[in-house]
């Protein structure tokens, strides 16, 4: 009986681990001029709305995690998918195409 429980336990966690590996994760940090970083903030607002704090955007979604920070001459973004139903990958790819053209 203990062996069956152990096998069941390991199977469940290995499936969960494989599912987590397939989830989208993105991280990037770009340095530029403060003026260009300010221009990028308007692009971020168009995609994700108003910042949580000045220069910081965070996710309120249960489907994905998001942290974007603009400070001085640095733009930092981290995004990760929580739910398989999330569309965060397309949002980040679209945003980063615009950001990279500005910076």
Image (tube, rainbow, N blue to C red):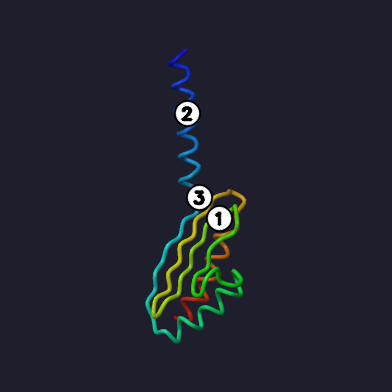
Task: Indicate which disc, 2 or 3, sits on the residue closer to the N terminus.
Answer: 2
Going by the image, does 33 lie left or right of 46? Answer: left
Give whichever of discs 2 and 1 has the lower sequence position.
2
Q: Residues within 10 Å of mark 3 (few under 14, many from 20)?
A: some
Rendered location of residue 62, percent (x, y): 60, 52
Does dot 3 land on a helix, a strand or a loop? Answer: loop
Q: Residue at x 44, y 28 (%)?
A: 10
Q: Which residue is mark 3?
A: 23
- Mark sitting on residue 11: 2
In this rendering, which labeled residue sits more in front, label 3 or label 1? 1
- How many angstroms separate mark 3 from mark 1 (CA)? 10 Å
| Residue density around tag 2, few if under 14, some if 14–19, many if 20 or more, within 10 Å | few
Q: Position of residue 29 (x, y in %)?
A: 39, 69
Q: Is residue 78 above or below residue 82?
A: below
Q: Which residue is mark 1?
A: 64
Specify the farthest residue to the front.
Answer: 53
Q: Position of residue 82 (x, y in %)?
A: 54, 50
Task: Mark 3 and mark 1 in contact? Answer it, CB < 8 Å.
Answer: no
- What kind of element bears circle 2? helix
Label 1 sits on a secondary structure element that is strand
Q: Position of residue 22 (x, y in %)?
A: 49, 47
Q: N-terminal of the two: label 3 or label 1?
A: 3
Give the CA separation, mark 2 to mark 3: 19 Å
Measuring 51% from the left and 61% from the top, which residue is drawn there?
66
Mark 2–mark 1 Cα distance, whole angstroms, equals: 26 Å
């Amino acid at each position: 009986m203990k062996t069956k429980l152990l096998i069941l336990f390991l199977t469940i966690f290995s499936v969960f681990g494989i599912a987590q590996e397939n989830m989208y994760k993105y991280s990037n940090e770009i340095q530029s001029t403060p003026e260009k970083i300010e221009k990028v903030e308007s692009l971020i607002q168009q995609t994700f709305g108003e910042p949580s704090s000045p220069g910081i955007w965070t996710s309120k979604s249960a489907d994905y995690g998001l942290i974007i920070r603009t400070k001085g001459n640095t733009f930092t973004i981290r995004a990760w998918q929580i739910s398989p139903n999330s569309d965060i990958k397309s949002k980040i790819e679209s945003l980063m195409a615009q950001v990279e053209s500005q910076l």
